[in-house]
Image: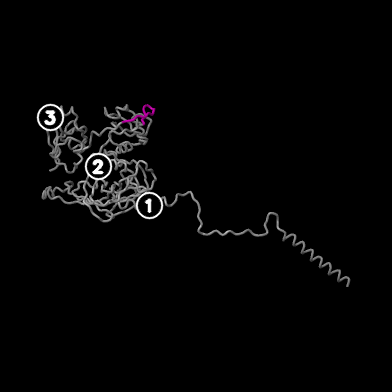
Amino acid sequence: MKSFVKTLSIAIGSAVLSIYIYDINFNTPAEGISVNPPEVTLIPANYTYTSNKLAAELSDFTVAAEKTINAVVHVKNTSSSKSNLPELYRYFYGNEKLPERIGTGSGVIISPNGYIITNHHVIENNSEIDVTTNDNKTYRATVIGSDPSSDIAVLKIETNNKLPYVFFGNSDSTKIGEWVLAVGNPFNLNSTVTAGIISAKARDLNKGDGKNEWYIQTDAAVNQGNSGGALVNTRGELIGINTAITSISGGFVGYSFAVPSNVARKVFEDIIEFGDVQKGLLGVMGQALNSEMAKRFEVTETEGFYITALEKGLGADVAGLKANDIIKSVDEISINKFADLSGYLASKRPGEDVNIVYNRNGKESKVKVRLEKINRASFFLMEVRELTEDQRKKFKIQQGLFISNMNNRWLYERGIDKGFIILKINDQEVSTLKNLQSLNSNDLESILFLKPSGEKERILLQY
């Protein structure tokens, strides 16, 4: 009995000891560990986050489109032209029964009383121009004026209602990479809006055509019929007039070009105020620099406009610029190519001053130059100027235009050269450069010349 009690006591004691040891080793929390689990925080699925990316609304074009779409019109040009008619047609019908041709384009209303800007080539050779607004109302338009060199024309429609219009923006402040919209009527599809960015500025598509091309290049889709339409920024401000594309197929291939709004606005204001375009002349002749020209002129500069000669008595000459000077900037606009210089000057008027930074023998200087009125024009591949008082006395005439340079090979082969004077065009006397604006080379019939010897000669241009 005693042995049984002894054995039972030992067993109970061992069990109690085992439970005690287990409790100490496994149920006592380790240092730094919480016995209770942490609270779980629920995160809703529609959470927001921050990012360095631009807000989506900055690429929202709806506001710009709404401001523009009702101010862009469809322009229809009905014309009867003598150009490109087959000789057989002339033989049977002469020039009395001319076939009608219809061209279409776009235009931008820029005032509530009906002034419209479009391209010169959209309304060229017109006999009738009809304008259709976005609400399908059609008006007969009048050509107020046109400037072939900038390819800008001004139309006017009459209405008692105030029309929606687009505000001008500052095309000089536009930047490469900036979002833009092109609004127009491609293929007669009214009120078409396309988007892109500014790909380049100051583009000259043909350096040998003598035109002041200073286009804004974009990748917004532009096709036939878009000419004369609006190029606007994301605020709906007019920064360009869509004008041209470069294409092998005839359709859009990724590049389109627009006349800057500062040029278009200046042409518009000149036509309204003066009846023609007032062009400021710097009075320099020369060549834009590149590595080839730098080597030719033996200079280290590869950017800028190298002056080879100056017109005596004009602004650059009076201000002290000289041959071999290099123009680096005009009004803080860098001059890297000829289009930079000619394009910017196209937005200025005679009488205005420009600040020029130039390089002379490696040293940069700054000078203010007053722009003078353009005293020459290009006509039928001839450079012509208004007569001076000395020339009037010498030739004993009061009207005419002096030929200062001859690039028309056809006339040159017939004995017409620089130094001659144009007395009449199509039997109409000419005496100012303005007389040439309404003339189209396709409609020329005859020119009456006065030779330096005093002999007159009439050249027939069509038969």
Residue 3 horizontal side relative to residue 213, left or right: right
Who is closer to the viewer here, 195 or 389? 389
Count of labels in the image: 3
Residue 142 horizontal side relative to residue 240, left or right: left
Residue found at x 16% / y 51%: 99
Q: Which one is in front in this view, the residue at disc 1 or the one at disc 2?
A: 2
Q: Which residue is mark 2?
A: 272
Q: Which mark is residue 381?
A: none
| Quarter of the image with the N terminus in it | bottom right
**Vertical order, 401 against 181 (above or below):** above
Q: Which residue, as the protein is rendered here, is positioned at the far front?
A: 160
Q: For residue 33, what is the image quadrant?
A: bottom right
Q: What is the crowding at mark 2: few (fewer than 14 residues within 10 Å), some, or many (at least 20)?
A: some
- Name the amino acid type tagged 2: Ile
Q: For residue 43, what is the image quadrant?
A: bottom right
- Name the amino acid type tagged 3: Gly
Secondary structure of the residue carrying numbered label 3: loop
Q: Which mark is residue 61?
A: 1
Residue 389 seen by the camera:
yes
Question: Sequence-wise, which precedes: disc 3 or disc 2?
Answer: 2
Task: Give the Cα separation between the discs numbered 3 and 2.
Answer: 40 Å
Circles 1 and 2, Cβ within 8 Å, touching? The answer is no
Secondary structure of the residue carrying numbered label 1: loop
Question: Sequence-wise, which precedes: disc 1 or disc 3?
Answer: 1
Circles 1 and 3, Cβ within 8 Å, touching? The answer is no
- Percent x, y of residue 81: 17, 47
| Quarter of the image with the C terminus in it | top left
**Vertical order, 333 against 121 (above or below):** above
- Percent x, y of residue 417: 18, 33
Task: Give the Cα separation between the discs numbered 1 and 3.
Answer: 65 Å
Circles 3 and 2, Cβ within 8 Å, touching? The answer is no
